[in-house]
Amino acid sequence: MESINRNGVVTPSRCLKPEAVSRLRQGISVHLSRWNGLQMAVKNEWGGRDSLKKSEQLAADILSWFSQSKALLCVEDLESLLHESLLLTFNTEIEDGSIEEVAEQLMIMHEEYLQGNH
């Protein structure tokens, strides 16, 4: 069974079941829709007119990161993915601690889906 250690590292030993992938995709999207920093960037079109589409792509990228990684999943890597996406896609620098919070919550959600607790 995979687990998150106190350093925020997920040790892989199994993959998501196909039915959980769809639910995880939805969970990621819902979680991102509640992230004020990202929603402000989308609402104000800081990523251009296709900001909504770009936020949907971020959700897809996160799902891909979770489902295709063969290495240990580390919360710091997810934080980097979120930070780079906001910076490069939305020209947005978020320094309120929400990137770390969102990354941690997504890692916990992923672990719950792996354990079938969703």
Image (cartoon, rainbow, N blue to C red):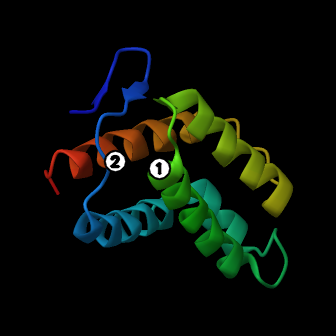
Residue 96 at least partly seen? no
Foreground tag (1 vs 2): 1
What amino acid type is highlighted by mark number 1?
Answer: Phe
Q: CA distance from mark 1 to mark 2?
A: 8 Å
**Horizontal relation, residue 6 to residue 61: left or right:** left
What amino acid type is highlighted by mark number 2?
Answer: His
Read off the residue under disc 2.
110
Are the residues at dot 1 and dot 2 in contact (C-beta closer than 8 Å)? yes
Read off the residue under disc 1.
66
Q: Is residue 81 above or below residue 59?
A: above
The quadrant the C terminus occupies is: bottom left
The quadrant the N terminus occupies is: top left
Q: Residue at x 62, y 55 (%)?
A: 37
Where residue 41 sits: x, y (%)? 71, 65
Q: Could you tell me which secondary element the residue under label 1 belongs to?
A: helix
Q: Residue at x 59, y 74 (%)?
A: 56
